[in-house]
Amino acid sequence: MFKIRIILYLFFLLCTVSIYAQTIFGKITDTIQAPLPYTNIIAKPSSENVAMAFAITDEKGRYKLELQANESYTITVSYLGFQPFSFEANLTNDSTKNIQLKPSTNELDEVIVIQDIPVRVKEDTITYKTDAFTTGTERKLKQVLKKLPGVEVDKNGGVTVMGKKVNKLLVDDKPFFGGGTKLGVENIPADAVDGVEVIDNYNEVAMLKGLSDSDKMAMNIKLKKDKKRFLFGDVETGAGTEEHYLVHPNVFYYSPKTNVNFIGDLNDIGVKSFTIKDYLDFEGGIGKMMSDPSSYFQLSNNAFSNFLSNQDIKSGINKFGAANISQEIGSNWNISGYSIYSNTKNQTQVETQNQYLIENEETIENKIVNGSTDNSFFLGKLSLDYAPSYNDDVSYSGFFKSSNNNDFDGISSVTPNLSTNLDSRTENKTITVKQNAEWHKKLSRKHTTSLTVNYQYDKSNPNTNWLTNQPILQGLIPIQNDNEYNINQIKSLKLHNLSLLFKHYWVLNRSNHIYTTIGNNILDEEYITNEFQELTNGSINNFNTADFGNDLNYRINDFYMAMQHKFKVGIVEVKYGTSAHYYHWKANQSTNTHKNKWVVLPNFLTKVEFSSSEKIRFNYNLKSRFSDAPKYANKFQLVGYNAITSGNENLENELYHSASLLYTKFSLYRGIIITGSATFNKKVKSIRNQLQLQGINQSSTPILTDNPETRWMFLGGARKTIGKFTVKANTNIMLSEYFQEVNSVLSKNKSNSTGFGLELGTNFKEWPNVEIGFKKNYSNFSSENLTSKFTNENPYINLEYDFLNGFIFEADYSSNTYKDNNNQKNNYEIANASLFYQKEDSAWGFKISGTNILGANYKNKNSFSEYIISDQRTYILPRIWLFSITYKL
């Protein structure tokens, strides 16, 4: 077992490596002494064995450049519109040099200098020249991005720049597989990347920039010229212990008009190319505009995403294939699309101890679930864009998804009074079709209009069978005595959603805009459930006689009008307005319900831009939300082997205040990135389940309440670079209060979670790079009869070392310790390592990798709610050693 003290010792021993460096400070101004922000300073050494250095000035024109002592450099200072300035330097100690630039008279010199600038900052765009930061041994885009100043990549492929999340990934100005970051950062070869552009306030419709207040950030990967009009990529194959295997091809083709990409994956080592997070990114919308975010319908979940969430498995086979194409047709048309296929077959094992606490009575359930899944899905999207001029933009997108999911759980449930063995099987076939059409027109300098139409169709038919040796849910379902108990549920869901939106942008002057919106959103759902017991003699015991069996047609229409005024005074921008919604809904079932109402929703947004690197943003909305159809289905239905629920046709919309405050600041001069946010939600009207508990069995019904619910969330992060070292700190605080009715007793519940993290990392080119950190989280839940506390500690270390002109060694280790308020501890440790070798200028690479090399059997997790405390143990893949060969195309 790794010892944290040994890791700390080795890390700080590494930090004692002497780095002989001197620093030159100064200020860069123009001829009237005005500071020149974001000026680039490049130091090129005369020796080939010394790395190039660079710096960039802050808003006050200050710079700080770290150079190796006793080495000769040619230092060039460049700023767009000014003549470059060069001088020689050979430092023996720290020094100061102020520089004054003169206006440029030669545009050709500017272009030559700009091509060599490592980092350029211009308004909303940061441009990186990646060769200035890489060593040439990087394999994938992920390793390149990690070495860029202010850029971070998490283990799931998410990217943040200067503390802000990247929402869209482009390659040579074209979306890459719909724009999600993971497939790109983990598969695009590093040697194909020439530069990286980061675009803040990104808008897919150029004419709407500055009008639609986009807060998105896009990353545009620029490819090297020699990678265009040629196939490039790589193919990796591997074999390992216990007959484990891996096949992973990536093929890319880019030309000025045609882009084609293919990513494939076949393995049984737990590598999943498509996860729940990726699915949500792809589901986030197929159009360029969004409808009113303050009013929305909660669409029924077809349970497809649930089958993507299993990350911890005992064994599994993953098959994945994805293709992406983009084609320019003439100068005005562009057609693009992607298709994704995935099939996973997994075996899981989860052991849980549930402690049910009801009215000072305690029931302990020890549960073991052995699961088996066989799930497949196909996603496809086709987009057509027509832009005859800057003032016109017409687009169409069509999206198709189908899935076939099979889930089996063998459940053993033991309580003091009963031992139950139960098999649960679920089959679910789903189809989703989405279509989007948009038209944007700049009528004149002052008037711009947008029109969008969205349509969505969903169909799913989940069928579940429970086979058990003991009667379940006694007193809650009309079960008949039998030798074994065979219970079935058949569900059907069909959904149609059509939304229309028209928006007009009126630019009164440079400082005042008026926005007018008219829209309509209609949702129609058909929801049917049927539960019955199949007896061993062949007869059917239908539960409809006990008020089961739903047959619901639910329809809701939202017609709305909105108006907003945006103005700017100095560094402050304010947008305020209101929207008026007329809701009309009906739920036709055994009893029919028809209702309508008006709801007025105010909104307010203000942004303060102290500089391009320091901003604050405050947003407030009064929001309205309607639940999905199952919440209105007024008859009972099965939820699981120990739970039933019934809907409530009298539900109305939830109404809640939502406010957020975001602060960001970065300084490349000081090497600092600071982010902080606060979010507040308070429900005026909320939907909560009324719970009735009998031991481990539960029955629930949603109700609309006036009981207040509040939730606070605070997030903070800071990052400081000092030479080759980076220190990171972050914290999170979540506080919530709500009321819950259990067994006719209303109680106030409080849930608090506080966490912090510290990390120290290095960024050497010749020495090993290490990230060592520690995370700790405190969780606390309290109600009138219950108080639960948990802590989680997570020390970790990541190592990467490029050595001997072709070797790359990577290793990671993490420890997780859970402790409850009774001082009971659970701990597990995970470690992985790999060694990769590729000779320079060779297409062949070789890799030895080991996962879970400490041989951990399971992971632990604790959770709690108003009536249950759970301690969960999830079994994971065993130790796997793999040898793989890579061929670069």
Image (cartoon, rainbow, N blue to C red):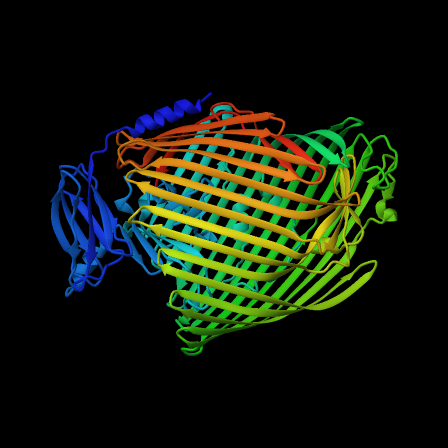
Above or below: residue 94 compared with residue 256:
above
Q: Horizontal and vertical percent for residue 737?
A: 64, 47
Can I make out residue 668 in this image? yes
Q: Horizontal and vertical percent for residue 154?
A: 44, 42
Q: Residue at x 16, y 50 (%)?
A: 97
Q: On the picture, is 616 further left or further right than 377?
A: left
Residue situated in front as seen by the camera: 703 or 219? 703
Q: Quadrant of residue 705?
A: bottom right
Q: Residue furthest front?
A: 784
Q: Quadrant of the C terminus?
A: top left
Can I make out residue 349 in this image? no
Above or below: residue 631 compared with residue 435:
above
Q: Residue furthest top?
A: 1
Q: Residue at x 16, y 53 (%)?
A: 98
Q: Horizontal and vertical percent for residue 617?
A: 46, 58
Q: On the picture, is 321 further left or further right than 511?
A: right
Q: Horizontal and vertical percent for residue 763?
A: 31, 37
Q: Residue at x 16, y 63 (%)?
A: 31
Residue situated in front as seen by the camera: 39 or 540? 39
Q: Residue at x 48, y 42 (%)?
A: 731
Q: Quadrant of residue 651?
A: bottom right
Q: Quadrant of residue 420?
A: top right
Total marks placed = 0
Residue situated in front as seen by the camera: 55 or 194? 55
